[in-house]
Image (cartoon, rainbow, N blue to C red):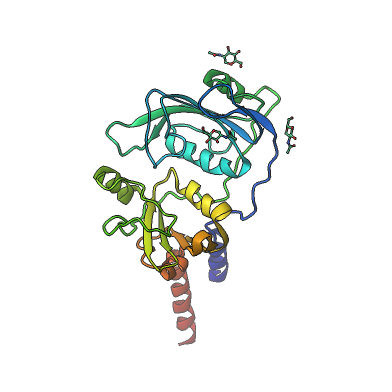
Amino acid sequence: MFFVFILMYLRTSSALLLSTRDRVSTRNITCQNGSSSSNLLFNCEVCLVISRNYEIRTTLSLTGSGPLGVTYACLQVNQIEAYHENLVRECNNFPQGTLNGYDDFCVASPYNKLRGSYRACMCITNACNLNYSECVQRTKPYWDQKPPTFSNSIVSLTNRIKCYRPYEDYKPQQYSSLTPLCSSNDYECKDFLFDQGILCVISVDRTNQITRQTLPPSIYSAHLMKYKSTFCKSYTWTSKSIYFTQCQQDETICMCAVDGCDKDLETCRKSRATSICHYSFFYFLLLVLNIYF
Ligand SMILES: *[C@@H]1O[C@H](CO)[C@@H](O)[C@H](O)[C@H]1NC(C)=O
Ligand SMILES: *[C@@H]1O[C@H](CO)[C@@H](O)[C@H](O)[C@H]1NC(C)=O
Ligand SMILES: *[C@@H]1O[C@H](CO)[C@@H](O)[C@H](O)[C@H]1NC(C)=O
């Protein structure tokens, strides 16, 4: 009985990554790209259109950050998960299970007193992002057409965790790819990250300098994807961490989702979801001891 329970538990919690396979492109559509309305690109996987009533400057949002007015994007297949996840996290009702969708109320950089709100729409037919209302129309399914389902390759992290404060001794490191997410005098931003972080990052560069970062819900997926698909050549992972090696500039990077797991690289690399498992194993041992003694 207990073995079954333990095995089942291990099976359901054994990976931070749900899939290691690269997403395969299934479309070749035309999308508007950039901020002027005359730049059409081929070979897109998904089109995106975003509308803002004022400029939003923040490093804490992938889709929210940008100029006043409308911006258009042609997304490649390796970009869609990061953008989709950002919209799911920042918008009231952006659909989690389908690729296309829209939302009129999304909020970027939610820590700020002047919160940046925007509208966003993702669509998957030729030239569907020429304007926002057209995009919204095109996401509504025809009677015989179901919107394509979408599933993540990274576990959807929701628990807030405490990472080491990255800025207390922060100096920009020449050989680290981690850059500060908040400017040095923006304490609201720093407190927001400390309170809302869901993934800790630690990097050791080729001069053995340690750099740390805390990632909030809207962009952890984008950062993880960057290292997984372009910046590093290999990785290993557990239920709560992913450890990247052979990265550009000889950096080693680890991301983890347990309180205090960014103490050092080893702690990060070994971070796992073990509590229930420990308990059940302990219980099991007690049971065995009871039988034998
Ligand atoms: C698409 O637009 C973005 C943002 O303006 C720009 O950085 C990028 O270079 C454009 N892509 C192409 C292929 O023109
Ligand atoms: C995508 O479509 C364009 C225009 O129809 C075509 O020129 C291009 O070769 C296609 N690309 C791929 C990878 O099929
Ligand atoms: C939006 O785009 C569609 C088709 O490209 C066009 O027919 C429509 O007039 C545009 N609407 C606005 C408000 O520009």
Above or below, 251 against 83 in this view is below
Picture coordinates of residue 68, whole percent (x, y): 41, 25
Residue drawn at the location 68% of the way across and 22% of the way down? 143
Pick whichever, 274 or 59, lies toward us: 59
Q: Residue furthest front?
A: 174
Closer to the camera in the image, 60 or 146: 60
| Quadrant hosting residue 33 | top right
Residue 116 place in picture, x, y as percent: 36, 31
- Residue 167, given in percent of the width and then of the height, sits at 29, 55
**Is the N terminus in the top left, top right, bottom left or bottom right quadrant?**
bottom right
Residue 32 located left or right of residue 250: right
Q: Quadrant of ligand 2?
A: top right
Residue occupying image coordinates x 64% and y 51%: 22
Nearer-the-camera pick, 232 or 24: 232
Q: Is residue 98 left or right of residue 53?
A: right
> What residue sits 61% from the left and 24% below the top?
128
**Above or below 142: residue 113:** below
Report the number of discs.
0
The quadrant where residue 210 appears: bottom left
> Which quarter shows the C terminus?
bottom left
Determine whether, in the image, residue 97 is placed left or right of residue 203. right
Residue 138 image position (x, y, % from top left):
61, 22
Farthest bottom residue? 293
